[in-house]
Image: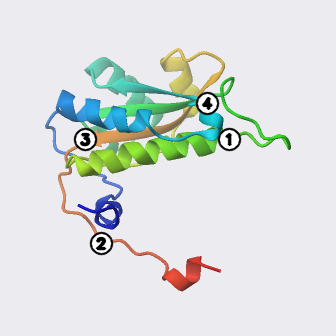
Amino acid sequence: MNLLELVNARYSCRNYQPTAVEQEKLNYIMECVRFAPSAVNRQPWKFRIVSNQEEKAKLQQCYNRDWFKTAPMYIIASILHDEEWVRADGKHHGDIDIAIAVEHLCLAATEQGLATCWVCNFDANLCKELFNFPDNQEPAVIIPLGYAADAIKPKTRKAIDEIIG
């Protein structure tokens, strides 16, 4: 699959099969994440794999949606604020860096036949508390990960001339 086919195949899945994700596939995905670029190569991130029932139940408190509960596992992507690069004008790049790494994760998962969804509308403070993250660590994105239970839905995108200018 070429890159255009891969990015077209990636979508926000909201219904997962109960099938567990194979460890080899998870290892491959996280290796792809490890190679994601970041400002000044700081790699200001931490990823927490959530797959046991107790931790899944805790995380589901942070984003209480029926579809979310169908995922067999989750990855919490956090920004390490004390490691992020800050531009001279004060602009912090942790959000940009975590976004690049998470998209590497999503594309690698798609390549492996898995599905994902970016979840940013969750209770980050509760997540931080329930998982005992240190002060410098901000949970930024939760990524459900598993095999899709539904067919890929067609995407709508702006025309190329609407995004170039």
SS at mark 2? Answer: loop
- Picture quadrant where residue 125 is located: top right
Task: Please name which of the two marks, 1 or 4, marks the residue nearer to the observer.
Answer: 4
Which mark, residue 70?
A: 3
The answer to whether 100 appears left or right of 137 in the picture is: left
Check disc 1 and give the amino acid type: His
**Residue on which the image places disc 4:** 42
Q: Residue at x 70, y 34 (%)?
A: 85
SS at mark 4? Answer: loop
Toward the left, the furthest residue is 19
Q: How many other residues sit within 10 Å of disc 2, few (<14), some (14-19) or many (≥20)?
A: few
Give above or below for 66 relative to 56: below
User: Is tag 1's residue or tag 2's residue first in the polypeptide sequence?
Assistant: 1
The answer to whether 107 appears left or right of 17 in the picture is: right
User: Is tag 1's residue or tag 3's residue first in the polypeptide sequence?
Assistant: 3
**Residue on which the image places disc 2:** 154
Task: Please name which of the two marks, 4 or 2, marks the residue nearer to the observer.
Answer: 4
Give above or below for 81 relative to 110: above
Task: Please name which of the two marks, 3 or 2, marks the residue nearer to the observer.
Answer: 2
Check disc 2 and give the amino acid type: Pro
Q: Are marks 1 and 4 in contact (CB under 8 Å)?
A: no
